[in-house]
Image (tube, rainbow, N blue to C red):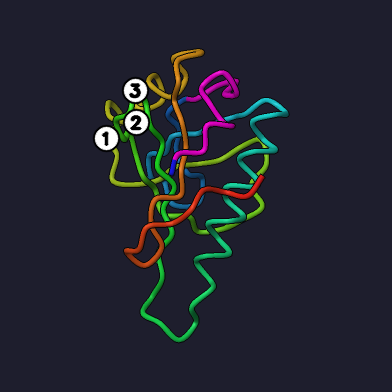
C-alpha cells in the first residue's frame, strides 16, 4: 500500500553525492518538517519490521519511492529514526544518481513512498 502522506512537495532538495566513509555514489534527500516527520515514521516502521523476525532468514525491509505509479527506487532500510535527511546508496553511476535525484525533487508531482516488502512478504503502510 502506498503512503500518500509523503510526497515530492515535502522534499526540499535531492542531489547526487558521495558517502564520506565509503566513497560510494549516493542520492542525498532533505525533507521539510512535515516530510521529516513522515519519513521518520516510515523508516521506523520499516526498521522495526526488519528486526521483527530474529529467527527467520536475514531480513530485508525496502521502502519504494514512486513517481506516477512507477517505482523509481526501492532501497533497503538499514536504520530507523531518520529525520530530515536520508541517503540512498547502491551501485549508482554519477549519471544515474543525478537522474534519480532530479526525479525525486521534481516538485509537487505525486512521488509517493511505501514499505513494499519485508523478507519478500508484502508489508502494510507506515502507521499514522
**Magenta residues (range):** 2-14
Residue that mark 1 sits on: 93
Q: Nearer the viewer, mark 3 or mark 1?
A: 3
Q: CA distance from mark 2 to mark 1?
A: 6 Å
Q: Which mark is residue 97?
A: 2
Q: Name the residue carrying label 3.
A: 68
Measured as percent of width and height from the top left, residue 48 is found at: 58, 64
Locate residue 16, reporting x and y percent: 42, 29
Left or right, 53 with reference to 5? left
Q: Of residues 14 and 95, which is closer to you in this image?
A: 14
Q: Is 74 drawn above or below residue 55 in the view shown?
A: above
Establish if 95 lies above or below 48: above
Image point (31%, 35%), residue name? 71
Q: Is residue 38 left or right of residue 26?
A: right
What residue do we see at 48% from left, 53% from top? 124
Residue 125 magenta-highlighted: no
Amino acid at each position: 500500500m502506498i503512503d500518500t502522506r509523503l510526497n515530492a512537495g515535502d522534499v526540499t532538495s535531492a542531489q547526487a553525492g558521495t558517502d564520506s566513509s565509503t566513497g560510494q555514489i549516493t542520492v542525498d534527500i532533505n525533507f521539510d518538517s512535515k516530510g521529516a516527520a513522515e519519513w521518520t515514521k516510515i523508516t521506523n516502521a520499516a526498521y522495526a519490521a526488519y528486526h521483527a523476525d530474529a529467527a527467520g532468514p536475514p531480513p530485508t525491509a525496502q521502502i519504494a519511492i514512486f513517481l506516477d505509479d512507477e517505482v523509481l527506487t526501492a532501497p533497503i532500510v538499514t536504520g530507523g529514526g531518520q529525520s530530515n535527511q536520508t541517503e540512498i546508496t547502491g551501485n549508482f553511476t554519477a549519471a544515474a544518481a543525478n537522474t534519480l535525484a532530479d526525479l525525486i525533487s521534481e516538485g509537487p508531482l505525486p512521488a509517493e513512498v511505501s514499505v513494499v516488502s519485508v523478507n519478500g512478504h508484502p508489508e502494510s503502510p507506515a502507521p499514522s
